[in-house]
Amino acid sequence: MPDPACAAVTAITFSSAERALGKTRLRVSPMAWGMWRFAGDDVAAAQGRVEAALAAGFTLLDTADVYGLDNGEPFGAAEALLGRVLKASPSLRGRFVLAGKAGIWPGTPYDSSEAYLTAAVEASLKRMNVERIDLFQIHRPDVLTHPADLARTLEKLQSAGKIGEVGVSNFTPAQTSALAAHLHLPLASTQVEYSPAAIGPLTDGTLDQALETGLGVLAWSPLAGGRLGSGAEITPRTAAVAHALDQLAERHEVSRPVMAYAWIMAHPSRPIPIVGTQEPARIAEAAKALSVRMTRQEWYAVLVAARGEPLP
């Protein structure tokens, strides 16, 4: 019989090198930087944040046309700020894969019709001062748009050179499959909420589908909206997850956020956590997650805390 102690000391490993996103030609870093909170009028400071992400090795930058509203700014403000940065320093554009999203219109709320998405892409390109969005994602599923119609729209946008690869965001596995069945090009990725405090993708089929089809996985809100960072632990279960992460963080001599990122990346579907901090020092710190090697016992201890009950 094998020694049970071996399982406790075998480290879960993952590569820090760039990899293909899904089955596409896009090469991306194992961690991404998100611009949900990318805001303000200081272009030099904004450029500093972009450069901090690139210096940390994050070559996938994720934004969306709706980003800005949650910051008390207009629709499109985050894209417009990135556009000002790229106008001030055009050489930055060649250093990262640009991931964008559209399909949310405040008040509608979702629209994936050809007319809307075509106009949305054109507007995003203009705001960001770019010619193409490398990874274009449908931000939320519009159930009133047939997936065959959405597929034709995406193919037209790609043929026109406006977008590169295509992905989905906040789609169920069934919705993802329905779109993929009508596309004449491979879906690159699915973006879902996934963190040690939001473990639904482990059991709802999302990560299993990624393993089955080779779909890339982008994990938004990897710190549970900040609750696993420096924010307050709102619920007893989130507090339990934070405690479990703290125990591992102390053992591995890293911060709790770094441990959370490492926990996410440990799954064999190789999820890419989208780091949302806008502080250059914390962006740099996040990259330490690429060096963390935890055991199965450690990983499952966090999962048990997230479940709030023992595993079967």
Image (tube, rainbow, N blue to C red):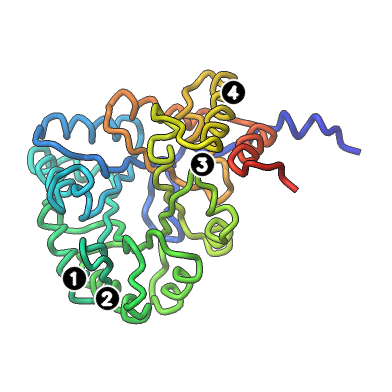
Question: Given contact means CB atoms under 8 Å apart, are the residues at marks 1 and 4 in contact?
Answer: no
Q: Distance between the residues labelled 2 and 3?
A: 35 Å
- Discs 1/3, front: 3
Question: In this image, 99 relative to 14: left or right?
Answer: left
**Pointer 1: residues within 10 angstroms few (<14), some, or many (20+)?**
some
Furthest residue toward front: 235
Residue 7 position within the rendered picture, expressed as x and y whole percent measured from the top left: 76, 34
**Could you tell which of marks 4 and 3 lies nearer the N-terminus?**
3
Q: How far apart are marks 2 and 1 (CA)?
A: 8 Å
Q: How far apart are marks 1 and 3 (CA)?
A: 36 Å
Tag on residue 153? 2
Q: Name the residue under label 1.
A: 118
Q: Name the residue under label 3.
A: 197
Q: How far apart are marks 4 and 2 (CA)?
A: 48 Å
Q: Name the residue under label 4.
A: 247
Disc 4 element: helix
Q: Looking at the picture, which amino acid does disc 2 mark?
A: Thr
**Could you tell which of marks 2 and 1 lies nearer the N-terminus?**
1
Question: Given contact means CB atoms under 8 Å apart, are the residues at marks 4 and 2 in contact?
Answer: no
Residue 230's place in the image compared with 72, above or below, is above
